[in-house]
Each structure stands twice: as C-alpha cells, then as structure tokens.
Amino acid sequence: MALRTTFELKTGMATREAFGKALAALGREDSRIVVCDADLSKSTYTSLFAKEFPDRFFECGIAEANMVGIGAGLASAGKIAFVSSFSCFLMNKGFEQLRVAVAYPRLAAFKAVGTHSGISIGEDGPSQMSVEDLGLACSLPGFTVLSPADEVATMALVRAAAYHPAPVFIRTGRAKVPIVYQDGQSFEIGKAVELIEGSDVAILATGLMVAEAIRAQETLEAEGISARVLDIHTIKPLDREAIARAAAETGALVVAEEHLVDGGLGVRVAQVVAGTSPCVMEFVGIQDTYAESATPEQLLDKYGLLARDVAEAARKAVGRKK
Amino acid sequence: MPSAKSPEELQALCKGLRRDIVRMIGAAKSGHPGGALSAVEILVTLYFDVMRHDPKNPAWEDRDRCILSKGHGVPVLYAVLAEAGYTPKDALNTLRKLGSPYQGHPDKRFIPALEASTGSLGQGLSIGLGMALAARLDGRDFRTYVILGDGEIQEGQVWEGAMFAAFHKVDNIVAIVDYNRIQLDGFVKDIMELEPLAAKWQGFGWHVIELDGHDIPALRSAFAEAASVKGKPSVLIAHTVKGKGVSFMENNPKFHGTAPTPAEVELALQELQ
C-alpha cells in the first residue's frame, strides 16, 4: 500500500542535523549511548550531544583510525558507540578499522554515522565528497547500511539503529532536504517504503534522490506514465521482496542515488532483480568521475541528479520494455 | 582466578608454554614462532600473576582485559589461555586447521575469551583505549593491557592512540612493547628504526618503564609501578629476544614467520627440557 499520492516537499533540516538531534534525545534516555567525533562535531551535529553529555562524548582529534578503534573498544565494554565524522573521512580513513575491529568480530553496539555524503556538500569539492561510502559499507560482512531521505526518516532510523543487533552505517547529508514523511511515520530496517503506487515503471531511490523521484513521478504522471516510487532507506539488507515485486509488476526499474553508480544501490538492486524477475533497468547516479566545487544545486544539475534526470531515465526504461 | 605462583613456578610454566608453542607451530607447518617466544614471560606474568580474571567466567564485567595487538604472536596467547583453562589444551595442535578455535590470528568469533580480533597491525591500542574509557565512565576498576610488537609501532594509528591516551589522561591502560628488534624483513634498525623509543613515548606524554621482558620479578614490579601512576598512561618497553629459549631461533629473522621443520621441533623440544 502506497503512503499517499500528493507530497508538499517543504524544505526541512539536513539529515546530519536530524541525526544530531536524535542522538541527543537518545542520550537523555539511555546512559549507555556514547559518541566519538574527530574534530567535526559542529558540522556533524554531535556537538548537541557533547553539550549535554560531555562525559560521554570523546573528542578524538583528527585521527579517524584511532577513533574507530576507540569506538570498537567502547562497544566491546557495554556501551552503544556512535562514531561520527564526514562520511569520506570515516569510511575511507577508518575503513581498515571498521573491517578488522568492528565487522570481523561483528560488534553490534557499534554505529558509524557519516555526514556530508554525496556531492550536495557543494563548494568544498571532491576531497570532502563521499561518493563511495555505500559501496564500502555494504562490503563489510554483517553491517546494516541505512540511507535516510529526510529528517523524519533520519530521526526514526538513528533510534532504530541504536538497538539494532548489528553494526550499522548511517549515511547523512549536509544540505537541507525536502520533507518527504509526516511525523509519526514508522520505519522498519530492511523494509522499503512504497511512497507512490504505479504500474509502468518503478523508481527506487535513496537519500535526497527520494524527493527527486517524487517530483519525477508528478511529471511522468502528466505524460501518462504510471511510476511507482520506493524509498530504499535500507541499502543492506535490501528489501528483496519489494524489489522483486516492483520488477515483476512493472517490468522496468530506475535506481536513483547520490553515489557512484559503481558499487552503490543500483548494482545491488540489479543483483536482486537478476536473481528474481529480470527486467529493464536504468541507473541514475554519479558516473565514473569526481565532481567539483559549485553550489549544491549546480552540482546536482551538472551531474544529472535532478527530477528531470530521473524522469528521463524512466521514459527510457519504459521505452525499452517494448 | 588462577592461584598465585612463585617466580620459579612461573619460570617453569614459561618453559612448558614454549614447548606448546613450538609443537603447535610445527604441527601447523606455518606461523610466527619468534614473536610468540619473545612474549612468553610478558603474557605469563599478566595471566598468572597480575591480571584479575576468571577462566570460568570469561564475560565477567570487572575482568582485566588483555589485547594481543601483535596478533601474529597468537600461539603464546593460545598456550596461556589453554593453560589457564579457557580453551582445550589437547586441541592446541589443531592451530590453523579447518574448524579449530585456534585460528591463524586472534579471532573472537572462535574464542570469546579473546578481547579483540587482531592481526592487522596497529589497532589494539585504540581498542584498548575504548575499553579503558568505558571502565572510567562506569567507575569500574578493571585495567586494560595491550601488547604491541616493535615493528607494529611503525603504524601511525599507534601514535594517534598514544596522543589520545595522554591527552585524555587514561591511566587505567598499560601498553607493553615486545622489543625483540626483529620484524619480517629483517632487523628493526634496518627496516625503520624506532630509536629513541623511550623518548618517543615520553614525548607523547606516557610514563615509560624500560626493563628486561624475560625477567618475571621485573615485569611484576613494572606492572605494579604502572598501576600506581595516576593521570597518565604507562608503557613498558620490554627488551626481549626474538625466538627466546630455542638457540637456533634466537635473534634469527628467519623465524619471524617460518615454522620449524619436524627435525627442528625435536631439537627445540630437547633444548626446552
């Protein structure tokens, strides 16, 4: 059952800010919650937690490898450890430690949260842009990987992640993003949300591409194309049932992500589709390149991550069916 | 908790564990004998004298923690854990074989009494610091010991951890450098010199104790000294001999990562009578 048919898409807060607020709220309820950051707490919003709970906040300085190890030690000794930085630094500089100190012993109380994901960070440019984090996180056996679309989803999923019996990576962004969900919407890790019903093509989107997918659906509807929209907020484990059903019922899928098309959501969805109901697929994402400095809007436009691009991919997919 | 033993009894125990190490690596036909043999007294002093732990209750929240950050030296830890009663002694010779709890490097999935899975060098100090912080937060008095290889501390992460520990005044952790002066490619001084090592740790804000890492009474008093130092972390720079106890392995870079042949195992066992 789809959620509803019309969306206001009013601009809300950035998912990084929603993460910071959710974390502080969790801290008030559960004294086991501890937080590590690497000199970016004002940007990751873990400063909100640090201000309220200075004893449970560990400033690690600009040393992500050590930070991940410290989080692993805390998680091994009875704490629920949230370890946060810009996604590119946490996942790239901390990857070896995530692999050996966290994933390998399957430390369920370890939660990695990357902010400033994707290219929508804008002016700071590619060295700060995390465009491979989903691929990296999904390659860690036993990890659960979450990619919320808006503030409502972020708050719910951060809370769910805290008590989820597996290590988790949560991907959040710097830019303010449209609010997709109404307050009180419930989320289940591993269960996609069908936002809009449709039968000609299904758009599987994650992160800020969910709002673009909703906008694309409105355009497509006006053209007589019935598009289903799914929010894939859990990248791993994927909701195989919802994906297989979308493939079987529409025969054409578009996957939209603010991530390199190599190694992201698209290839993972294709794997499910190949093993269930093979169908036409199109992929909206960052091609084999690094972006550049510009405003977030200019970058999403230049690198093909707008509703326009999703709609075009949907038309192409529908056309290829015949 | 294992009953207290005299230094003489501990010394005898070390000899027995060296035999276990040689036998198990010989049976596995691969492994790292040199760095296991150099750390025997360090681990024996910890597990049979210094540390508070209970083999019947490996998940005891107030147990002292020991992390073997130089994971390739794990045969010594397996010999100690088996001797203490955590794991089956009669299975030591299944080291590195399919289905064995005695994996090639420490793997918590197979032996819950291992405090961390290690093997990729440089990570143990950070993990130990997290445990030490948790103890401080909860007002628990357990202590955390991290055994580092000398070659291992060429890894940058170790120094990130060293800086963190002093800055955050983590005084319930002790790092032990097994300074056997040999790494895989040769002598440490020829690969990437560490000296002046004590000055490095001092410069990072640590209380430094240098000692003979095969001298059990010296180890014992060094751990006691470390426990009395407040407001800063302590490190033992333990001068050791790679391959200690087996004449043809001592100071021989070949036995960093080469298993003894059956004939060499026999020879070694004769020396360790």
Image (tube, coloured by chain):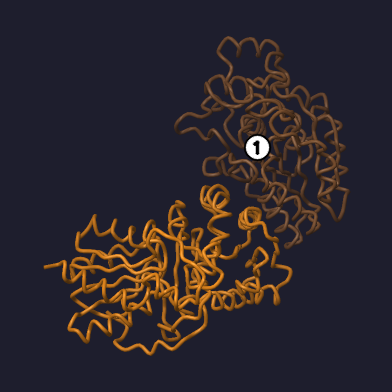
Chain colours: A orange, B brown
Q: Is residue B111 left or right of residue A200?
A: right
Q: Which amino acid is tagged 1? A: Lys
Q: Quadrant of residue B239?
A: top right
Q: Quadrant of residue B164?
A: bottom right
**Circle 1 marks a residue in which chain?**
B
- In the image, A320 versus B240, the foreground residue is A320
Picture quarter with the C terminus of chain B: top right
**Percent from the top left, x then y, of residue B112?**
57, 44
Image location (x, y in percent) of residue B61: 67, 53
Rendered position, B78 above or below A90: above
Q: Alpha-carbon neighbours of circle 1 within 10 Å: few (<14), some, or many (≥20)?
A: many
Identify which residue is drawn at 51% across, 73% down. Answer: A122
Number of callouts = 1
In front of the other: A283 or A145: A283
Question: From what the image shows, is residue A255 above or below residue B272?
Answer: below
Identify which residue is drawn at 65% across, 68% down.
A40
- Which of the two residues, A161 or B114, is positioned nearer the viewer here? A161
Q: Please provide percent x and percent y for residue A125.
A: 53, 67
Query: For the N terminus of chain B, which image quadrant?
Result: top right
Secondary structure beneath disc 1? loop
Residue occupying the point 49% across, 58% down: A166
Q: Is residue B126 left or right of residue A180?
A: right
Which quadrant of the structure image shows residue A3?
bottom left
Residue name at image x 45 percent, y 66 percent: A146
Query: In the displayed structure, would residue A184 be above or below residue B259?
Result: below
Q: Which residue is mark 1?
A: B70
